[in-house]
Image (cartoon, coloured by chain):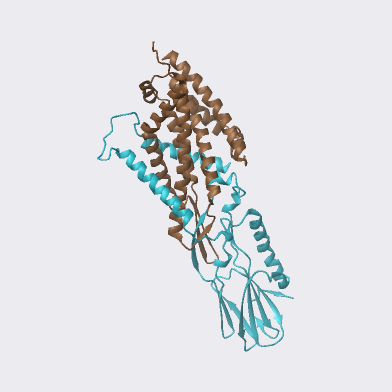
Amino acid sequence: MIVITSILFYAAIGFVIFLLFRRNTTLKPKKMNYYGMNRTKILLFIYGTVLLAGTILYFVFPFKIKDELVLNSDEVNQIIQEQNKVFDEIYEGKVEELNHLRKDSWEFPLSGNKLQISGDDLDFIIAVEKKENDGVLEVIHYMPRSYTSGTDITNYLPKPNIQLNGSNLIIDLQYIELEFAKMEKEITINQFTEDSWDDSDMSIGINMGALLLRIPENVNLNNPDIHIIE
Amino acid sequence: MSLTEVKLSNLVQKQVKYKLQSYLGVFSSLMATQVLAMIFSAGGYGSSTTGTGGVDISVHLYAGNLIIIFTLVWAFASAIQLTTKGYRYEDFTFVTNRLSSNLSNIIFLLAMCFIGGLTVMMSSTFLRLIGLFIFQDNVIGFLVPLDEWMIGVLSTSLYLFLIASIGYLVGMLGQIHKIFYFIIIGLSLFILYQGLDILSKIYVFFAEESSLFIFAAKVFSVSAILLLAAVLISNRLEVSK
């Protein structure tokens, strides 16, 4: 129904524009130029030539396009499940289940037995796991796949900035702006090919992932709200 | 009374040739319509912007969908124009009758719609080129292969012909009496606001057909009925005017 409504909306705009630009097309003696062509014919000839040149260029020139990033609706559903699963798996300490995800890790030597976590935007699920007393703080970032407008954007998302300042672990997000052009097939092509129109194409599912902190057993965490894996 | 017998096929052929060469206004308005649609779509026919977790993402969608819709409007309006007095009287340049005039108009509509379909796909391709040059390395999606491009030309031409056939019938009705325009507009608004059920059924009948061959059969069958009705109306027009 959305498709019909939008087609009708654009058709109405198009009709109004057509009425505004409509020309009187009854035959009249036309002014000829030196070559025996009137202005309309010249314009049509230029238009046709430009379109033809563009079409030839499009099919001949090897343009780079990332077609592997386009997702179908099954893949989008798979990503949604993957995003939901990552929280459960980390909370339950089943991190081996997440090894297929994009993973970044950091290691910091830790002196003392206190740790404070801070950051300007902790938009992550953070869980802490205790390990043997080796004096090393391990931070692992698990990134499930993210998508927008039917496109896998996981590899464009930045990993967080993580620094250890004394006993203060600072976790910050990197702010980025991304701009893409997504080439789609026309509705009249989609109808007869396998990639049918899908409203879920416009849905968004961005997940900045989850952090797992592996801290030595003798280190005490000063953030009481952070989940500790038993 | 003439001693020379004019064959219908020759007459129609001459009229079609004449119309293709002289109805330049139809094609210049096609060009204006498509250029305008391309301008509207130059930054993408749609876009989505998302901001979450420190990431702002804008995706600009490139396809010739707006060009298709605008060209459908052009086909409808141009077909109506063909039924107007100015155009009908031009047929008297030839030895003519209603049948040859209508047949040449129908063949002209076919040719016009094919040119429309071809230029829709070519201008959509041009639009993609704009997107490819603007965004260069940040382009995702599909490059339409040549075989699918050809499918696009055919299917778009068929849609244009269907809409042009409706336009031709509406135009002929309007030639009987202008009140028919208001009746048709009123009827369309009634269908739109009282429930889109009929519209949905029509949409499903055509737009959810995945076989190009069956789709073509559907379009030609429905168009044949519409055009036949238009021809019958035009015969009545001859008597009344």
The spot of residue B161 in percent (x, y) is 51, 34
Among the 4 quarters of the image, the one containing residue B18: top left
Q: Is residue A189 above or below residue A136?
A: above
Q: Is residue B181 visible?
A: no
Chain coloured brown:
B
Q: Is residue B89 above or below residue B70?
A: above
The spot of residue B232 in percent (x, y) is 51, 19
Q: Is residue B82 above or below residue B2?
A: below
Residue furthest to the front: B3
Residue A83 is left or right of residue A171, and the answer is right
The spot of residue A77 in percent (x, y) is 66, 56
Q: Where is the C terminus of chain B found, in terms of image quarters?
A: top left
Among the 4 quarters of the image, the one containing residue B112: top left
Depth check, front residue: A150 or A168: A150
How many numbered badges does the structure rendering display? 0
Q: Name the colour assigned to chain A in the rendering.
A: cyan
Give the residue at x 36% y 43%.
A45
Residue A80 is left or right of residue A162, and the answer is right
Residue A7 is left or right of residue A89, and the answer is left
Q: Where is the N terminus of chain B found, in terms of image quarters?
A: top left
Residue furthest to the top: B1
Q: Is residue B20 visible?
A: yes
Depth check, front residue: A229 or B191: B191
